[in-house]
């Protein structure tokens, strides 16, 4: 049994004798996770078990904690070195038989080719 489940059972036992007007509306059992891996794991039936509900209806067992005070802001760090400039198009390599234009970049590499045949075919169909 996990530490969380043991703690909840202890709370349930302590609350069992607390008078409550709405005892008939309380749940018959509460699902308690035996794993603290994640919310998804807590929802998994293989990692849960039923614990008899001895907590009076409407009684708050636990709440989420409040956010703490913000800390002091630290001074900015040193400025980094300037990066290399991006490559620009220096020239175009034209393949007239396939209607493809490939950019030649300033660093000497080839950019992605532009397949232009489809555009010329569309223009030819619309211009007729």
Image (tube, rainbow, N blue to C red):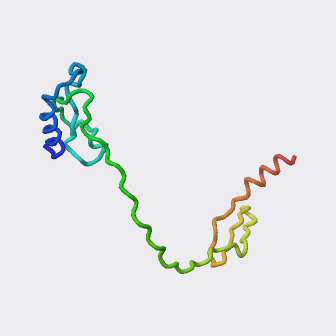
Q: x and y percent of residue 55 in the render?
A: 19, 30
Q: x and y percent of residue 20 in the render?
A: 20, 24
Residue plotted at (73% across, 69% down): 94
Q: Nearer the viewer, residue 8 or 97?
A: 8
Q: Quadrant of the N terminus?
A: top left
Q: Would you identify the image quadrant in which residue 11 lies?
A: top left
Asked whether, in this view, residue 121 is left or right of residue 127, the answer is: left
109 w.r.t. 65: above or below: below
Asked whether, in this view, residue 109 is left or right of residue 16, the answer is: right
Q: Would you identify the image quadrant in which residue 108 lies?
A: bottom right
83 w.r.t. 17: above or below: below
Q: Nearer the viewer, residue 4 or 73?
A: 73
Asked whether, in this view, residue 112 is left or right of residue 19, the answer is: right
Residue plotted at (57% across, 79% down): 82
Q: x and y percent of residue 115 in the render?
A: 69, 59
Residue plotted at (86% across, 48% down): 127
Asked whether, in this view, residue 5 is left or right of residue 103, the answer is: left
Q: Would you identify the image quadrant in which residue 96 lies?
A: bottom right
The residue furthest bottom is 81
């Amino acid at each position: 049994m996990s530490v969380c489940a043991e703690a909840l059972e202890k709370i349930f036992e302590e609350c069992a004798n607390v008078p409550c007007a709405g005892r008939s509306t309380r749940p018959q059992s509460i699902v308690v996770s035996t794993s603290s891996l994640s919310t998804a794991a807590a929802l998994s039936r293989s990692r849960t078990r039923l614990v008899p509900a001895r907590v009076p209806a409407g009684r708050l067992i636990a709440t989420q904690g409040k956010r703490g005070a913000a800390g002091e802001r630290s001074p900015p760090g040193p400025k980094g070195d300037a990066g290399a400039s991006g490559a620009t198009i220096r020239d175009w390599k034209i393949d007239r038989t396939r209607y493809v234009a490939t950019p030649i970049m300033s660093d000497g590499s080839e950019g992605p080719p532009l397949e232009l045949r489809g555009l010329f075919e569309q223009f030819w169909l619309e211009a007729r």
